[in-house]
Amino acid sequence: MTEKRVYIFGNGKAEGRADMRNLLGGKGANLAEMNLIGVPVPPGFTITTDVCNEYYAIGKERVVELLKDDVTKAVQHIENLMNSKFGDVENPLLVSVRSGARASMPGMMDTILNLGLNDEVVEGLARKTGNTRFAWDSYRRFVQMYGDVVLGMKPTNKDDIDPFEAIIEEVKEAKGVKLDNELDVEDLKELVKRFKAAVKAQTGQDFPTDSHEQLWGAICAVFDSWMNERAILYRKMEGIPAEWGTAVNVQAMVFGNMGDTSATGVCFSRDAATGEDLFNGEYLINAQGEDVVAGIRTPQQITLEGSRRWAALAGIDEETRAAKYPSMEEAMPEIYKELDAIQTKLENHYRDMQDMEFTVQEGKLWFLQTRNGKRTGAAMVKIAMDLLRQGMIDEKTAIMRVEPNKLDELLHPIFAKEALAKAKVIAKGLPASPGAACGRIVFFADDAAKWAKDGHKVIMVRIETSPEDLAGMQVAEGILTARGGMTSHAAVVARGMGKCCVSGAGMLNINYKERTIEVDGLTLKEGDFISLNGTTGQVYEGQVTTKAAEVSGDFADLMDLCNKYSRLQVRTNADTPHDAQVARNFGAVGIGLCRTEHMFFEGEKIKAMREMILAETSQERQKALQKILPYQKEDFKGIFRAMDGYPVTVRLLDPPLHEFVPHDDKGQQEMADAMHVSLDYIRKRVESLKEQNPMLGHRGCRLGNTYPEITQMQTRAILSAALELKAEGINCRPEIMVPLTGIRYEFEAQEKIIREEADKLFSEMNTSIEYKVGTMIEIPRAALTADRIALHAEFFSFGTNDLTQMTFGYSRDDIASFLPIYLEKKILKFDPFQVLDQNGVGQLIKMATEKGRSVRPDLKCGICGEHGGEPSSVKFCHRVGLNYVSCSPFRVPIARLAAAQAAVEDTL
Ligand code: ADP
Ligand code: MG
Ligand code: MG
C-alpha cells in the first residue's frame, strides 16, 4: 500500500507513467503518459486503484477523510492550469469524473461529465462563453448523468427506458423534432427543470448544488460502480479479479458541444475488425462525450477513404455523401492533419494498435484517452504480423501479442460461397465484427439466455445495445443492431467477444412489443432464423450453410513463426480419418490418442462387438473378435493414411463393456436372434455385466488382461493395417498404448501379449514394421511407480481426464452438483477438468516424467486429455519437459501458439 493516493497531470507534466497502470488504471496511466510525450490532454488527477480497495475495506466516510487534502490540492492544480475556479459563478471550472481499471472495461463503468454546474453557474458559463445553448445543453447532460449514476434514478415505466430519456422523448414529441440537437435553449431549460423534479419525486432528495458535494458524490459513485452487476459480469467473463479495483480520474472538461467548430470522436490507428493498417474512426460535430458511441445521431467518418467505404455500404452516392456526410478530413482539414499526426505518434509510442477518444473545442484538438484497442482474433493476428513486418516489434513480441484462445475465432466456419449466392439478402448494415453467424431471432437478453439454455442458437437483435444486454450478447451467435456505427457499444463489445456483429442496419424496423422485425414488406418473428455476415454487413433470411475455416495468410505465417520457437510438439486426439486430416491441416504432427471404442458404435460393427461382450467362453469371444478384426483394420488404415509420416498412438479398448450392450428389449431380441440364444439369456448376461462403479471397474487394461484375445485382435488389426499400407509406400508409425495401468505387471503382461502377437503376425507375413509399446499414466499409483513402469514402457501418455478424476476423487460425470458452488466460494479457482491443476495433478505428471526418464532417458512423454488444448496447461507441459500435447483438432493451432509462447517466456 503506497501512501500517495492522488497523482496529478497537466501541461506536459505528470506524476504517473504508462507502466503504472496497476496503480493508476489504464486510463489514468495513459493520460499521464500522453502528457509526458506532448499530446494535448486536459489537466486533471487520478485517485489510485488502492484507494478503491480501501473504500471497500474501511468505508466511504473514512476514505473521503483520507483523500480530502490531496483532492483539494489537486483541484487547485487544475484551476491554476485552466485559469478558472471550481464552483465559481463568473469563471467556473467544470470537470469530468471517470472510472478506469487496470484492464479496459468498455462501457462497464460510469462517467460523469460537466460536473460543477448549478442554476447560477450555468448562467455564468453562458455569459463566459457567450453560448447559452451550449451552457444549458451541458447542464441538462450533467443532471441526467449525475441522476443516473450517482443518485441511482431508475426507469419508472415498463418499457425500461431511462427516466430522463423518457422526458426528452416527451419534449421532442411535443415540439415535433427528432434529434437532441434540434432542441433550443428554452427546451433545454424545461428539460433541466423536469429532470430535477423527477429526481425529487423518485429519490426524495434535492439535486445537489454544491460543486464539492457533487464531486465527492461522483468519486464515490465510481468506486461503487466497480461492484455493479454489469461490471461483475464483465470481470467474470474476462477473468479480471475483483481485487484490482478501479481508479478515478478527475479532469478538466473540454467541450465538443460549443457549436460547429467543435466535435467529439473515437478513432483507431488500425481496423479493429480486420486488422488492416488503416486509420479510421467516427466523429460528430457539436456533440459531447459518448454521443458517438451511444448511437443517438449517426456519426460521420473521420477519413475520406472511410467515408467512401461507408457510403458504398449504405448505398449513398458520392455527391450526397460529400454534401451531407462529409468526412472530418474534408470538413475540418487542419484538425484532421493534427489528429492523424498524433494517432501515428501514439501508435509508434505504444507499438500497438491504439483506440483513442478526442474532442475538438472551438477548433482546438484535445485527446481524452488512448489504449491498446480491442480487436477480433483475425485482426489480432494480422496486426501482430504487420507490426513485425513493419519493424515495430520483434518475433518474440509478435508471438506474445496473440492470445491463444482468440485463435478459436479464426477456426470457426465461414459461409460457403455457393450458399451465399443463393441466400436472400434482406438488409445491409456495417461490418462491425467479422465472421458468419446463423440463429433464431431474439430481442431481449433474458430470452437469449433462456433460448440458448434450451439448446437453440440465437441472434440478438436490438435497435441498439447497452451494457444491460451483455448477458444476451454473450450467449448469442451474433448480434444485429438497427442503429449505431462501427464504434457503437454493440460493435466494440462484439469484437471483444469475437462475435459476429452487423450494426446500424437502419432499414430494419424493430418492434420490441410485437417482437418482430419488419423490413421491406417482410415480417420476421422472434424464433425465426436469420444469418449474418459480419465481414460484409449483409443480413440474410433463414439459415445459410457454412464451411470449415483454413489456416492461410498471416495465420499460417504466425504458425510458422511458432514452429521456429516452440519445443513442445502438438498432436491431436482423433478417432476418424476426417478428424485426423482436419488436425493435420491445422498443423498437428501426429495422433496422441486414437480411441478404438468409438469405431464400434455404428451398424454391423456394434453387433459383432456385442457378440464379443456377451460371449461366455474364450472360444466364442474369439469367434466374435474375428468378425471385428477386418473392420478395425480398415479403420486404422484410414487413420494411418491420413497421418502418413507421423506417429499414431492407438489406445487399446478402454471403457467398461456394459456401455456397449443393448439395454432395450428390441436390441436384446436382436442379439438373441443373431447369437441363436434366448432373450432371457441375453438379459441375464447384460445384468451380470452391471457394475456399481464402472469408472473404477472392469475396464482399461483389466479387460485386456482378463480377455487377452481382445488385445491380440487389436494388435493384429493395428499392425496388419500398418503393414498393408507400408506395401503401398505409406510411412506408418504405430504406437500401441495400454490404458489404465496401475501396476507395472499389468503393463508387462499386456506388452507380452502384444509382442507375441506382433512376432506371430510378422512371421506369417514374412515382413515387419517398427512399432512402440507404451502406456497411459492416469492412475496415481502409476505416476508414483513410474520408474518401474518405464523399465518396459517406451512412452507415457498422461491421460489427464482420468488422472484428475482419480487424484481429486471427483467423478467427472457428477461434478455439476458441487462445482459451481466450489467456484463461487473460491474453494476451487477453476474447473480442474478444463484447466490442469498444476499444484496437484501437475506434480504427479512432473514426478512421473522425471522418474520414468531416470530409467529410460529417451522416454517420450505427452498428455492427451482436454487439457492438451488449454493454453495455461500447455505452458505447464512445456515447463515440465513433456515432448508433446495432444488435443482435439480445432484446438491444435491454439496449442501450437501456447507452446511457442511457453518457449518465448523461458527466454524473457
Ligand atoms: P468510458 O471508459 O466509458 O469510455 P470515459 O471516461 O472515457 O468512459 O468517458 C466517456 C466519454 O466522455 C468519452 O467519450 C470521453 O472522451 C468523454 N470525456 C471524458 N472526460 C472528458 C472531459 N474532461 N472532457 C470532454 N470529454 C470527456
Ligand atoms: Mg462509460
Ligand atoms: Mg473512454
Image: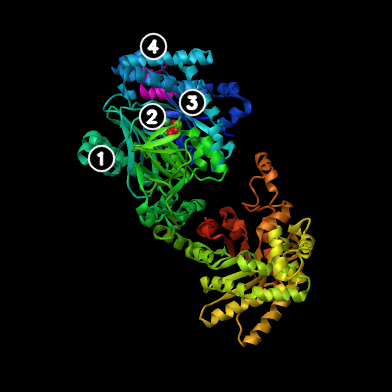
Please name the amino acid that badge 4 sits on: Glu
- Residue that carries the numbered disc 4 in the rendered image: 120
Disc 3 to disc 1, C-alpha distance: 34 Å
Residue 38 placement (x, y as % from top left): 35, 37
Which mark is first along the chain, 4 or 3?
4
At mark 4, the secondary structure is: helix
Density class for disc 4 (Cα within 10 Å; few <14, some 14-19, many ≥20) is few
Does mark 2's beta carbon lie closer than 8 Å to ligand 1? yes
Disc 1 to disc 4, C-alpha distance: 46 Å
Residue 192 placement (x, y as % from top left): 40, 15
Residue 160: numbered disc: 3
Residue 145 placement (x, y as % from top left): 44, 23
Task: Specify start and end residues of the magenta stretch as a single range.
Answer: 75-95
Closest to the camera, between mark 2 and mark 1, is 1
Q: Is residue 21 magenta?
A: no
In the drawing, does residue 629 fall left or right of residue 210?
A: right
Which mark is first along the chain, 1 or 3?
3
- Residue that carries the numbered disc 1 in the rendered image: 316
At mark 2, the secondary structure is: loop
View extreme (left): residue: 319
Please name the amino acid that badge 1 sits on: Ile
Q: Is residue 16 above or below residue 72?
A: below
Density class for disc 3 (Cα within 10 Å; few <14, some 14-19, many ≥20) is few
**Residues tagged 2 and 3 counted as in contact (Cβ below 8 A):** no
Quadrant housing the N terminus: top right
Disc 2 to disc 1, C-alpha distance: 27 Å
> Which of 130/175 is in front?
175
At mark 3, the secondary structure is: loop
Which mark is first along the chain, 4 or 1?
4
- Residue that carries the numbered disc 2 in the rendered image: 289
Closest to the camera, between mark 1 and mark 4, is 1
